[in-house]
């Protein structure tokens, strides 16, 4: 059995809740922010709907220091663990109105434009719109719709809510009280004082949660607690608890480790720390690989992208993770670290079999390196799901080729959802290399998919559908790279 060190008096999870500082020294590793708010603090404006990060009724803002900046992001409280909140500022809907009861512009706009009917989802919408209000002075309709991807409403049809967002954006006179803006400098100082200098360890009965202060502390914690559950964004692990009731003890929370938040750009490519969220990685990935940016916009809703990390999407080894196929096609490598040192391997070699990765019990994913894509190479990534936004992929295909004239010089194709791991289509690649980049070549190569994949049937898609869709995506890639009309591309890809 792993040995737990004795808890010191100062071992506690400390954060700011609205305007009060909280210190919790007896916290279960599986305690969610939603339950803490509703059951312990009686802040019942935060609602429980799906308990799996889909509906957005539990949306709150969590502020964190990013260098010298204070960044607030919408998150799903139902799958955010209390243990991950150290040195953050949690803001709930109760904090928005002024002390005299005057509503915040976002709240008032929801009233003025009839953005609420039954009212259950309204606090979550208000918090998502408040996050947008704080970060974007002049949001476009597309910005508003993106901010609301993770919020579901069965009553209003969304149009009144969008109009409320547009109206609130223009309501910024200096006389308006905004609790976050008014206290920003003081909050920065308070959060700096909460930054951990050592690993925090909390025992709750027989359970244990650990919050390392840095990457070295994470390596040491994993060496002591082999087999511990490492939690970054909890967009996957949260559902293990709320839906599957799985034990995850002991838990190591790593979302506050600054070293894992880095994004470094060089002539060779991008280095992305394992703790970088989809939201934080969006700008760099979109600039270097535009198709990757468009894909990120379809990973969950805004709350999920704010919490979920690329490193976590890799480390959990899911065969339907959205980021591994394009990263494999781009030739990414992954660096693993432990107390024994670091090692780097091609990402495609990290995935061995379903539920099995080339990672020792005391190793963690430290970073991902993505080589720069040569300007003359073609790259695309396509996600197929039952609904366009905020849905898990039935399959996801990524494609990259280089041409010598009109002949395929190199080809890299990878799919998620087609096998027990994210996997290259080696036989299809071989069928393309050396051939003209034409419809005839692609149709011949489509027959090779059966040699690379034997997909399963499940509630997301049948084996037959997955195989047909994979073949059609290769044709879509050809048509798009040849500048064909969008209608023809959609038809060829099976999108009616």
Image (cartoon, rainbow, N blue to C red):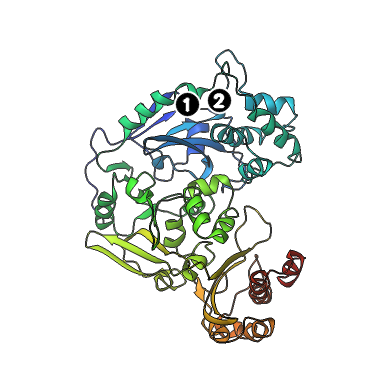
Q: Earlier in the sequence, mark 1 or mark 2?
A: 1
Q: Is residue 55 visible?
A: yes
Q: Position of residue 15 (x, y in %)?
A: 39, 32
Q: Is residue 362 visible?
A: no
Taking the image as shown, residue 175 lies to the left or right of residue 475, namely: left
Q: Position of residue 180 (x, y in %)?
A: 49, 26
Image: 116 above or below 176: below
Residue count near mark 1 (Cα–Cα under 10 Å), binned few <14, some 14–19, many ≥20: some
Image: 310 above or below 25: below
| Dot 2: element | helix
Q: Position of residue 153 (x, y in %)?
A: 70, 41
Q: Residue furthest front?
A: 405
Q: Quadrant of residue 442?
A: bottom right
Image: 404 above or below 139: below
Taking the image as shown, residue 493 lies to the left or right of residue 11, namely: right
Q: Position of residue 391 (x, y in %)?
A: 62, 56
Q: Quadrant of residue 435?
A: bottom right
Q: Which residue is mark 2?
A: 94
Residues marked 1 and 2 touching at CB (< 8 Å): yes
| Dot 1: element | loop
Q: Residue at x 63, y 28 (%)?
A: 106
Q: Residue at x 67, y 75 (%)?
A: 475
Q: Nearer the viewer, residue 444 or 55?
A: 444
Q: Residue furthest top?
A: 100
Q: Nearer the viewer, residue 388 or 245?
A: 388
Q: Which residue is mark 1?
A: 18
Q: Nearer the viewer, residue 76 or 28?
A: 76
């Amino acid at each position: 059995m792993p040995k737990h060190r004795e808890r010191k008096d100062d071992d506690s999870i400390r954060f700011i809740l609205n305007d009060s500082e909280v210190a919790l020294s007896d916290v279960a590793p599986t305690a969610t922010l939603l339950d803490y708010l509703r059951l312990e603090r009686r802040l019942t404006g935060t609602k429980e709907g799906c308990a799996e990060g889909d509906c957005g009724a539990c949306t709150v803002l969590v502020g964190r220091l990013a260098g010298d900046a204070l960044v607030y992001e919408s998150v799903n409280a139902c799958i955010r663990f209390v243990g991950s909140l150290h040195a953050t500022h949690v803001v709930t809907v109760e904090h928005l109105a002024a002390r005299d009861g005057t509503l915040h512009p976002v709240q008032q706009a929801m009233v003025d434009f009839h953005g609420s009917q039954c009212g259950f989802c309204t606090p979550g919408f208000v918090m998502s719109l408040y996050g947008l209000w704080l970060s974007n002075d002049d949001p476009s309709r597309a910005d508003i719709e993106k901010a609301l991807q993770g919020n579901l409403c069965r009553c209003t049809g969304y149009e009144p809510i969008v109009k409320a967002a547009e109206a609130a954006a223009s309501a910024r006179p200096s006389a308006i009280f905004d609790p976050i803006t008014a206290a920003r400098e003081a909050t920065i100082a308070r959060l700096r004082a909460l930054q951990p200098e050592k690993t925090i360890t909390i025992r709750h009965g027989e359970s244990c949660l650990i919050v390392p202060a840095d990457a070295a502390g994470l390596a040491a914690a994993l060496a002591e607690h082999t087999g511990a559950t490492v939690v970054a964004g909890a967009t996957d692990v949260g559902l293990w608890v709320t839906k599957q009731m799985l034990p995850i003890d002991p838990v190591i929370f790593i979302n506050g480790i600054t070293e894992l938040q880095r994004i470094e750009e060089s002539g060779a490519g991008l280095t992305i720390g394992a703790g970088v969220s989809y939201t934080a990685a969006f700008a760099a990935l979109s600039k270097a690989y535009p198709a990757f940016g468009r894909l990120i916009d379809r990973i969950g809703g805004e709350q999920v992208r704010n919490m979920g990390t690329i490193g976590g999407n890799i480390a959990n080894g899911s065969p339907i993770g959205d980021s591994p196929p394009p990263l494999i096609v781009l030739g990414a490598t992954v660096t693993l670290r432990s107390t024994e040192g670091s090692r780097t391997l091609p990402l495609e070699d990290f995935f061995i079999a379903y539920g099995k990765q080339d990672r020792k019990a005391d190793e963690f994913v430290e970073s991902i390196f993505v080589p720069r894509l040569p300007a003359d190479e073609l790259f695309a990534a396509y996600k197929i799901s039952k609904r366009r936004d905020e849905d898990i992929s039935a399959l996801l295909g990524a494609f990259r080729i280089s041409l010598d004239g009109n002949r395929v010089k190199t080809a890299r194709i990878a799919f998620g959802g087609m096998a027990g791991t994210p996997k290259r289509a080696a036989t299809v690649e071989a069928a393309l290399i050396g051939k003209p980049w034409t419809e005839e070549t692609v149709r011949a190569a489509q027959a090779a998919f059966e040699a690379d994949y034997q997909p399963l049937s499940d509630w997301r898609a049948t084996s037959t559908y997955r195989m047909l869709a994979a073949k059609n995506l290769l044709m879509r890639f050809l048509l798009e790279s040849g500048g064909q009309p969008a209608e023809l591309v959609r038809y060829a890809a099976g999108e009616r």
